[in-house]
Every structure is written in structure tokens, then in C-alpha cells.
Amino acid sequence: MISKAEQEYRRKIIEYGIASCELEGCIISDEYRRLSERYIKGEITLEELGNQVRKNLWWRYIVSSINV
């Protein structure tokens, strides 16, 4: 279990990253948002979040970029 302060810090980091990407025109998937929420709550580590993104979400980005 992580502290409320750590959760707030993680939420700020994730929300900043999402906002930055959206300003660049990216569409953030619901799956990424769910994974991010698990990281914020301390259910998974940052490394696990990154691994899940690379394993499950990266190919979707490639396919959607090709279909543009």
C-alpha cells in the first residue's frame, strides 16, 4: 500500500503526461487509463506499467498510425 501523498504525486505525473500527449494530438486509450490508475493506486509498479504498455498497447499505436 502506498501513501495518499504518493498517490497524489503519481496522479499528477500521469495526468501531466496524458495532457501533454493529448496536446500533441494523441488519443489515450481506456486501457492505458486503467493501467495508469492501477499504477497510481500502487497495484503495479512503473516498470510493470511500462511492460504492459509495450506488450499490449504499442502495436495498436503502430496500426492506428498506419491507418491515418
Image (cartoon, rainbow, N blue to C red):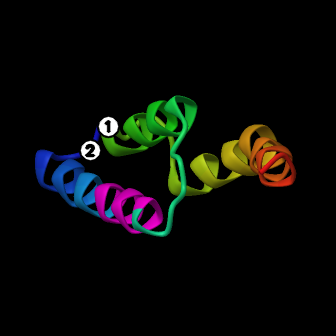
Distance from the alpha carbon under mark 2 to that under mark 1: 7 Å
Left or right position of 27 against 15: right
Q: Which x, y percent locates residue 48?
A: 62, 47
Numbered-mark total:
2
Amino acid marked by disc 2: Ile
Q: Quadrant of residue 36?
A: top left
The residue identified by callout 2 is 2
CB atoms of marks 2 and 1 within 8 Å: yes
Q: Residue at x 13, y 45 (%)?
A: 4
Disc on the earlier residue, 2 or 1: 2
Q: Is residue 19 above or below residue 31?
A: below
Q: Residue at x 72, y 42 (%)?
A: 57
Magenta residues span 14-22
Q: Residue at x 37, y 41 (%)?
A: 42
Seen from the viewer's position, the closer of residues 64 and 59 is 64
The local secondary structure at tag 2 comes to loop
Left or right position of 33 against 27: left
The residue identified by callout 1 is 41
Q: Which x, y percent locates residue 64?
A: 77, 45
**Viewport quadrant of the N terminus:** top left
